[in-house]
Amino acid sequence: MAQPAFAQEGDPVIVVTGEGLDETPALPAYDNRTIDREQLLSVPSGRIEDALSSVAGFQQFRRSDSRSANASAQGVTLRALGGNATSRALVLLDGVPMSDPFFGYIPFSALAPERLAQVRVTRGGGSGPFGAGALAGTIELTSAGIADLAGFAGQVLVDDRGESEASASVGTRLGSGFAVASARWDRGEGFFTTPEADRVPQSARAAFDGWSAQLRGVAPLSEDIELQVRGLAYRDERVLRFEGADSSIEGQDASLRLVGRGEWAFDALAYVQARNFTNVVVSSTRFVPVLDQRNTPATGLGGKFELRPPVGEDHVLRLGVDYRRSDGELFETALSAFSGQVTARRHAGGTNTDLGLFVEDDWSLGALTLTAGARLDRWTIRDGFYSERDADGLPVVAEAYPDRAGWEASFRGGLLYRASDALALRAAAYTGLRLPTLNELYRPFVVFPVVTQANSALQNETLEGFEAGIELSPARQVTLSLTGFDNRVKDAIANVTIGTNLRQRQNIDAIHARGVEAGLKAEFGRLGLNASVAWTDAEAQGSGFAAALDGNRPAQTPRFSGGATLSYRPSEDWLFSATLRHVGAQFEDDLETDILPSATTFDAYAQIPLGRQVALVLRGENLTDETIVTRNQGGSIDLGVPRTLWAGLKLGL
């Protein structure tokens, strides 16, 4: 960064990055992959969830993206440790957890790829500095700095259905710091998620209309301390299957971060989040509203402090504490499908908290790096309630659930041995913790004709796992990786069938996943290849009411997934890429009665300069028009994105 205008000769040049502390030496001991900025900007759909899908094993609860999915189903997991709609992977944006405080879903439509410098995906459980919630892994999103966003940049595209995507950013240096403002707006009439043969006059396209805006500032407070401030606001409205089946999400986030890079390095972070969700459920037989989830306000509040004291060149010691509080309430009205009159008014909610203390040390011994960490969590589940009143306002149900609290210890450790410049070996073991969400504890829901009950007595999920891997670089700019893993989520929360069209969230004995992950990254001059595959043998283990699912594959988890992207860059401003992706067959439910067939898609991207700082952008999604089944409940089917062609202009290359 340039020296500020007021600096005198001999004064130190202050450089701010807008990032957190540097990576630790033992990071490669765990199975992690980085998605760089070029990959993020060339995703054919323009959606962050599709960029994340380049890491095999990443999955949402359903195959829909954030244009056509109900947001409450957009939970994230890795390594086939799914089975319900809540995230088992921890998603962080500049260190801030992004999961909704009530539901646990990730607001993907608010996470614009063009705002990011990179994404690092660590598959496998985490404890230590990552916080509770990292059962299946950690997904760390890092905002782009002024080096990528200086000046003005923008993009406007339309597709063959008349849908549009527009984004813009303005970045400026302020002395030794910088500020960046960015915004994005996506809208369109969408596509029919209902197969043509099953459509009725009331069937609707999956229309969407969403915007997000972010303001980020970074300023130095001294030679080695910088202040980072970020604000994010968003709103997204969608329609699902039938006219009137409207849903919305909105949020306002703010965070403050101090990063010190001196001898006593530290990272201090505080954040607050206000979120809301609304949803109207329409009867699939009478096509009128039967449930109005009119308000689900939730608040996330938390922070983290990490200290790295100077303990010698061979060690990186991390000491810290983090805290997260989730408050939320549900207000919904049930309506008669025949008269349209109110039949019940429901109100539910509660508060979850987690306070964690952690310590971790990386020890470098020449070619060998050892790492070990421990974490102690004090968790609480309290103030839980559920009430229901009839149409006249008279109480039908009034439950106040007992408060609960406890301590949970978790550990992780690993080693990395660089046998040569071409060969590295690694191994790791870990445990982890996830609290049930307020949604799982207190909110029942209906996806007609199936009713799923909440369960205020749910226990925490815990993870035990280990893995071993090899990194091989047989030639310059060629990296091969192979990882074998064994992960087990004990007391896994699943939607368990307990009667005809009736399920309940319950802790089953475990979800056990064993598998192999492989990756290839190579550059041959102007050609690039990035491939990732995962094969996972996962099974649910249950007893009691859950005995029927014992040995079954968890719902929504494919056995095989993989993809490859081939790119060609004739010059700096030109780019062509093509992506082939396959997701294996998976089951809709825990009893393996309804199947979602495998799907193979082909996408493409092209950037062609038209002049200085202007380029033509062409994108193609699902170019072979593969039928992607995203839901199948007793033959009631939803479909994913059909063939979609985009064209537009990009400014500020």
Image (cartoon, rainbow, N blue to C red):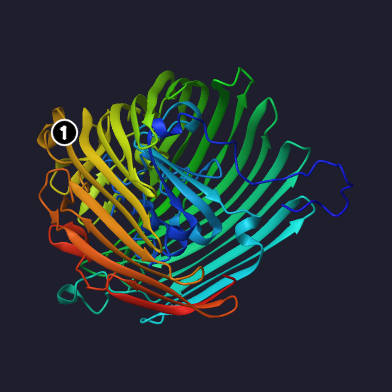
Quick one: 104 or 384, which is closer to the camera?
104
Q: Is residue 570 above or below residue 598?
A: below
Residue type beneath disc 1? Ala
- For the question of whether residue 639 can be seen, the reply is no
Relative to 187, say whether 516 is above or below.
Answer: above
- x and y, in percent, of residue 585 in the image: 15, 53
Q: Residues within 10 Å of mark 1 (few under 14, many from 20)?
A: many
Left or right of residue 364, residue 500 in this image: left
Q: Which residue shows up at 32% across the image and 45% down it?
A: 444
Given residues 210 and 223, the one toward you in this image is: 223
Residue drawn at x 73%, y 36% is 224
Residue 574 visible to an observer of this rendering:
yes
Residue 452's image quarter? top left
Q: Residue at x 82, y 52 (%)?
A: 4
Q: Quadrant of the C terminus?
A: bottom right
Q: Secondary structure at mark 1?
A: helix
Is residue 252 rendered to the left or right of residue 633? right
> Could you tell me residue 85's position as x and y percent?
32, 47
| Residue 583 spot, x, y in % from top left | 21, 55
- Residue indicated by mark 1: 546
- Please tell me how many numbered marks the rendered image carries: 1
Q: Nearer the viewer, residue 442 or 112?
A: 112
Decide: is 403 above or below 201.
above
Q: Nearer the viewer, residue 472 or 225?
A: 472
